[in-house]
Every structure is written in structure tokens, then in C-alpha cells.
Image: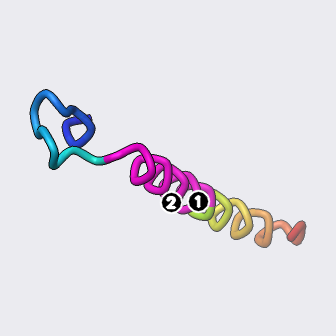
Amino acid sequence: MLTNRRSVLGPAANGPRYRIASTAVVVGVGGMSTILPVQTVLGWFGLA
């Protein structure tokens, strides 16, 4: 990703802690975004 390339951004590039935190947030939001429609569809069939 562009924001992780020190050759392009130099000292303004994201550090490893920021990358780990942002990856965790993206995985969490993605997981919750997947769970919601699954629960909705299961609710239509009385399974949730």
C-alpha cells in the first residue's frame, strides 16, 4: 500500500504498530459486516 512505502513517503509512512491496529480494525468491521446479513437471513427462516 502507498501509505506503507517508506521509499515514497519517507518519515510520513505508517509504522508497524499503526499497520497492526488498522488491520485489526478492518478485520473486526469486516467480520461484523458479514455477521449482520447472515443473522438477518437466518432470522427469516427462524434459525437465529
Q: Is residue 20 left or right of residue 41?
A: left
How crowded pointer 1 is (Cα within 10 Å; few <14, some 14-19, many 20+) is rated as few
Question: Label 1 to label 2, Cα distance in Å?
Answer: 5 Å
The circle drawn on residue 46 is: none
Quadrant assignment, res 39: bottom right
37 vs 18, nearest the viewer: 18
Is 19 contained in the magenta span?
yes
Does 44 sit above or below residue 35?
below
Quadrant assignment, res 5: top left
Residue placed at 10% from the left, 32% from the top?
Answer: 8
- Please give the range of residues in magenta: 15-31
36 vs 8, nearest the viewer: 8
Quarter of the image with the C terminus is bottom right
Dot 2 corresponds to which residue? 25
Dot 1 corresponds to which residue? 28
Does 12 sit above or below residue 36?
above
State the image coordinates of residue 26 (x, y, percent, origin top left): 48, 55
9 vs 44, nearest the viewer: 9
State the image coordinates of residue 14 (x, y, percent, origin top left): 28, 47
